[in-house]
Image (tube, rainbow, N blue to C red):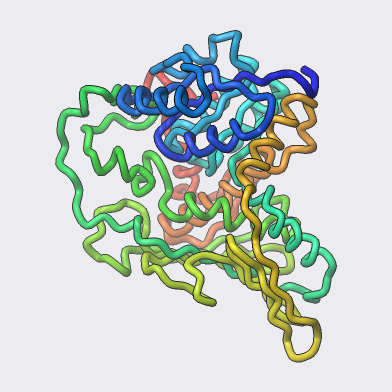
Amino acid sequence: MTANDTINVALIGCRNMGWADLCAMMQNPGVRLVALCDVDKEVLDRRTADAEKNWGSRPQQYGDYRQVLESKDIDAVIIGTPDHWHCKIMTDACAAGKDVYVEKPAANSIGECDAMVAAQQRYSRIVQVGQQKHSAEHWKQLHDFIASGQLGRIARVNVWANFTYVVLHELAPDTEPPATLDYDMWLGPAPQRPYSQTRNRSWRCFWDYGGGLMTDMGPHLLDMALWHMNVTKTPQKVSAVGGNFVAPDNKAETFDTLSVLFELDDFSIQWNNTAIASGPYGSVNGLEFVGQNGTVVTNYDWWEVLPLGNRMEAKKVTATPGEHVVHTGNFLDCVRSRRVDLLACPITHGALCAKFAHLGNIAARTGHVLRYDDNKKTFHDKAADKLLTRPYRKPWKLF
């Protein structure tokens, strides 16, 4: 493939974030939408009409991703499904010779993260994770600033994300699924359960399909902590406290309030989420890098240097839009060049960020202080080891 070649793409999972990924990717030159795939015919028809209106041609429709992967006309796929499908579709896509842009978190378990890295390496595919902050100019400038050493030794990074959508005061009753939805395919490798609109639409709040705020916002914000601090391995020790402290009647399985402490070689990262829409420095989400000479505070819109005394100069940098287009464009460039090393967020890094998020949830779910051995793939803790991966419902099999 050369720099001038058109890349034929398909979107698998069309409702929300997958559609946003596609719209961003289509703003780059040399890309053509060939197919859309979704298990809900209503969503599929609506997005097909949107695609025809936006880009002037009607994509092929599919209800089963495996048919997409059989098509020789498709070079790359975007995976915008719920988290419990990421690993299976990505590993199958790699085996089918497709390149992959997969939404975060990379996977719904630590074991699946390892399977995804193995598949990328076995089949030599280009795999980008949709952690588009890596392609934002103000985050790159912050990375350079922290690397300059002006903050002095950084002892702690605080990370927070406070959103209310993890509180479910009511559960919709079990019913027959909508006629347009292939519910068995929506479940896929997840356990068989009756259909509930709450579980279907608020799937992030249930362990079978997601991991709450920790695995939704965590891969974005923890990513910035790991990237800027040059972390390439899992933490030495993890401890956590989680519960429904905002809404004791919360029907979600995941936590509305969670605090996690990640201990690394010479600094710590602390994660906090609370289902109250407020936060430090007037920001509902962000990071704080605490150094000897001052503190850097940052969120999606800006970063600011808060000096300690006169040890450094105050500074504030504002974000510029367009990171999503740049991030998908980086993926397309690497598809053409076959340069995995030039990916903004390769699966190896995306998997590490997802592992941190899952480690936090596992520590909170078990109530144990954990030491994870990423080489031997064990906590040496029976309760925690049971949560390293999840059994796949037959006939689905993990890679």
Q: Quadrant of the rendered structure where residue 390 is?
A: top left
Residue 369, image x and y in percent? 52, 62
Along the viewing direction, whichever of 34 and 261 lies nearer the viewer: 34
Asked where in the image residue 5 lies, by quadrant, the reply is: top right
Residue 247 position in % (x across, y down): 27, 65
Q: Nearer the viewer, residue 344 or 327?
A: 327
Which residue sits at x=66%, y=33%? 28
Q: Vertical placement of 193 versus 45: above or below? A: below
Question: Is residue 247 at all visible to an observer of this figure?
Answer: yes
Residue 388 on image: x %, y %: 50, 42
* Numbered marks: total: 0
Reply above or below: 84 against 255.
above
**Residue located 75% across and 30% down the image:** 334
Position of residue 27 in the picture relative to residue 232 (left or right): left
Residue farthest right in this picture: 148
Depth check: 329 or 265 in front? 329
On the rendered structure, is 272 left or right of 143?
left
The quadrant the N terminus occupies is top right
Task: Give the residue at x 66% y 65%.
Answer: 318
Vertically, is 277 above or below 70?
below
Residue 366 image position (x, y, % from top left): 42, 56
Residue 156 makes an appearance in the image: no
Residue appearing at x 63%, y 18% in the figure: 75
> Who is closer to the viewer here, 150 or 332?
332
Q: Quadrant of the C terminus?
A: top right
